[in-house]
Structure formats: structure tokens, C-alpha cells
Image (cartoon, rainbow, N blue to C red):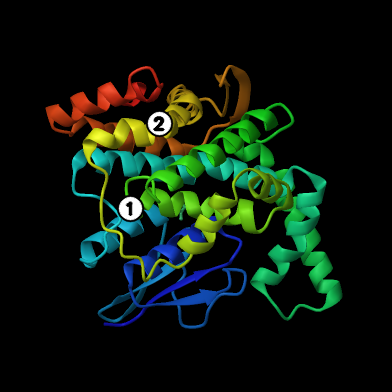
């Protein structure tokens, strides 16, 4: 079989998520560092130019595919060993929810910390330039760094990061560090002694927050060296032996706090965003964690809510019952029919 190729940059949390997942799954691959600014000769362009872009071999060439979540599902179908989505429908729903929370909510912390504080923005600008091209000379590097920084800073509002929402995003990140610290101490991963898609999604966002951006990196260094060590190791789990998913009886004790966090911030966000889209609005305001939140609508995230709800509807009655009892009082029960 041909190696699976992917294009991405080290500063892309979704690229790191997928590279670590390929390593854990021992799927032969080739990482192509780069971006769509300098298109690869003889490679097709994806419909939406996102990173990572995967190039799946086809009968007569290659197919360019983006969006890590459906790519993970495709890899689950195409490769048998070391799967990251459990068969148990209850655990499967939870891993999908956690993956989504990381991809769509924790990424707000990633983007916020990268560009909100001037120390972090000054650190990230040149990295963005050199991650794409190591050979830039001084002047073009400075120009490129400034162009990236001003483009990204001007887009902070798109994910809802502003002076008004800063503490909501930062407190959620700070709580997540404590929650992950305790999860890792108990089992190693969110759903047991083996990593799930949810772990790789959290890991992807945290690579940036812990390895790259000074403000959140200082927080993690002070409050959870264990989490830092977990990220360093999750980067390459090709030799990991752990193979146990959590028994259902341990879900509440192990995942209760994480579910609580998802219900506290992400579910209200998803619901307010979807409602605004349904009403044909371009922006919305809501309360998250009891504080005012405002941002433009995000159609992709309305799809995320739809997928989770569709999956919830299709669950067998006993699973539905267990989920409801696990979610009761956390805010996550609003995802269930
Ligand atoms: N939902 C996508 C998100 C991928 C994504 O947003 N990638 C970012 C880089 S981390 C990107 O390519 N953004 C386009 C841009 O910045 O122009 C996934 O899971 O792969």
C-alpha cells in the first residue's frame, strides 16, 4: 500500500492532531511540511484550502481531502488495528463529543492566546512565516510575519475572542488543565489506558498552548508539568501498549468533570450559534458561564450540533438512558432528544 501523504504546518493544531494519530495507529505516512501558499506540483488542490490536507491514493492519482473528523472516521474504516473510536456506542458518543469540544471550543483558547496578548503575538508572527518557508530572508520574513499577525489579529473576533470574552476563554482553559491533569493521573487518557480521537483532538490544540505560546505555556508549566509530559509523549505513541477502554461503571468518576466543563461552555455556545443561524442572523450574543459572549455565527459549528444530535437520536434506549443520567445537571443533557 502507498504511504498516506499529508500537508501541514507545525503550528496547526489539526495537523499535529492527525500526525500523532497516524503515528499511534502505525499507518505508514509522509508528512509534507508546507501550506497552500506555495502549491505542490502534481498534487490536486482541495475544495477548501485547510491544513492538514490529506492526499489519499486513488486508482489514477490522488484525492485531496480536508477536515480531520471525517478523515479519522475514514481511517477507522480502512485500517483495523489500534482504533481510536470505541465500538461501545456510549463511549463512541463521548469520544465524538470530546473531539468536537477540543476542535471547536479549545481552539478558541489556542487562537486567543496566540494573538490576544502582545508578547504571544510577537512570538507567533515570525514562527508562522518560517513554518511555511525556512528559507525566507530577513526582510521578506519580517513582512510575512507582520502580514500574518495583522491578518490573524483582525480575525480574533471570528472565534469570539475579545476583551469582553477573554476571561471566559482563559478560565475554561485553566480549568481544562486541571481536569486533564487528573484524567492523566488516573488512566492516562480520556477514555481509558488507550487514546481516543478525543485525546488526539485535545492534544492537537494543547501542542500550541504548551509548546508555542508563552502565556499559556507558563500556566501549564506552573500548574501541570504532568500535562506537559503527556503532550510530549502523545506526540508519538507508536509503541504504546495500553489497550483498555473504560468500563461504563467508571465513566462518571473519570469523565464527570470534563462533561461538566463541556456543558458549562461548549453546549451553550453550540445552541446559541445554531439558533442564530436558524433565525437568519449574522451575529449572536448569549451568556456563557454566566458572562456575556458575542461573535459572528459559524455555520460549520451548527453542523457539529446537528451531527451530535443525530447520533444521540440513533442510540439504543439503554445507552440513551445512561447518557442522560451521566449528563443530568451538566448542561450536556441539552444535546439529547
Ligand atoms: N475542521 C478542520 C479545521 C482545519 C483548520 O481550520 N485548519 C486551519 C489551520 S490550523 C486552516 O487551514 N485555516 C485556513 C487559514 O488559516 O487560511 C479540521 O478538523 O481539520
Q: Is residue 99 left or right of residue 316?
A: right
Q: CA distance from mark 2 to mark 1?
A: 19 Å
Q: Position of residue 44 (x, y in %)?
A: 44, 74
Q: Position of residue 60 (x, y in %)?
A: 29, 81
Q: Position of residue 47 (x, y in %)?
A: 44, 61
Q: Is residue 107 left or right of residue 302?
A: right
- Residue at the outermost left position: 317
> Could one spot residue 40 in this view of the protein?
yes
Total number of numbered labels? 2
- Residue at the outermost front position: 185
Q: Position of residue 320 (x, y in %)?
A: 20, 27
Which of marks 1 and 2 precedes in the sequence? 1
**Residue depicted at x 62% and y 51%:** 209
* Above or below for 195 versus 249: below
**Residue 271 picture quarter:** top left
Give the camera-side residue of 334 and 45: 334
Q: Which residue is mark 1?
A: 193
Marks 2 and 1 close (CB-CB < 8 Å) = no
**Residue depicted at x 45% and y 66%:** 19
> Could one spot residue 270 in this view of the protein?
no
Q: Which residue is mark 2?
A: 259
Residue count near mark 2 (Cα–Cα under 10 Å), binned few <14, some 14–19, many ≥20:
many
Amino acid at each position: 500500500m502507498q504511504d498516506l501523504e499529508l500537508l501541514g504546518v507545525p503550528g496547526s493544531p489539526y495537523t499535529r492532531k492527525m500526525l500523532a494519530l497516524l503515528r499511534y495507529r502505525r499507518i505508514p505516512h509522509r508528512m509534507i511540511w508546507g501550506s497552500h501558499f506555495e502549491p505542490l506540483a502534481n498534487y490536486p488542490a482541495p475544495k477548501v484550502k485547510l491544513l492538514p490536507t490529506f492526499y489519499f491514493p486513488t486508482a489514477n492519482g490522488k484525492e485531496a481531502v480536508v477536515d480531520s473528523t471525517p478523515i479519522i472516521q475514514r481511517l477507522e474504516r480502512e485500517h483495523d488495528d489500534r482504533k481510536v473510536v470505541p465500538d461501545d456506542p456510549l463511549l463512541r458518543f463521548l469520544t465524538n463529543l470530546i473531539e468536537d469540544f477540543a476542535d471547536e471550543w479549545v481552539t478558541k483558547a489556542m487562537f486567543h492566546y496566540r494573538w490576544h496578548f502582545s508578547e504571544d503575538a510577537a512570538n507567533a508572527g515570525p514562527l508562522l512565516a518560517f513554518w511555511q518557508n525556512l528559507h525566507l530572508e530577513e526582510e521578506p520574513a519580517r513582512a510575512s510575519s507582520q502580514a500574518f499577525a495583522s491578518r490573524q489579529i483582525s480575525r480574533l473576533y471570528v472565534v469570539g475572542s475579545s476583551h469582553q470574552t477573554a476571561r471566559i476563554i482563559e478560565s475554561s482553559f485553566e480549568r481544562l488543565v486541571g481536569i486533564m491533569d487528573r484524567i492523566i493521573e488516573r488512566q492516562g487518557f480520556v477514555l481509558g489506558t488507550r487514546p481516543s480521537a478525543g485525546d488526539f483532538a485535545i492534544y492537537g490544540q494543547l501542542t500550541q498552548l504548551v509548546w508555542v505560546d508563552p502565556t499559556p505555556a507558563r500556566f501549564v508549566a506552573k500548574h501541570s508539568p504532568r500535562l506537559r509530559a503527556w503532550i510530549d509523549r502523545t506526540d508519538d505513541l507508536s509503541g504504546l501498549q495500553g489497550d483498555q477502554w473504560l468500563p461504563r461503571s467508571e465513566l462518571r468518576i473519570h469523565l464527570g468533570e470534563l462533561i461538566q466543563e463541556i456543558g458549562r461552555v461548549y453546549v451553550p455556545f453550540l445552541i446559541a450559534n445554531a439558533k442564530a443561524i436558524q433565525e437568519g442572523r449574522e451575529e449572536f450574543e448569549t451568556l456563557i458561564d454566566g458572562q456575556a459572549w458575542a461573535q459572528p455565527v459559524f455555520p460549520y459549528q451548527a453542523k457539529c450540533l446537528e451531527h451530535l444530535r443525530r447520533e444521540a437520536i440513533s442510540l439504543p434506549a439503554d445507552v440513551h438512558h445512561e447518557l442522560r443520567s451521566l449528563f443530568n445537571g451538566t448542561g450536556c443533557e441539552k444535546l439529547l432528544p
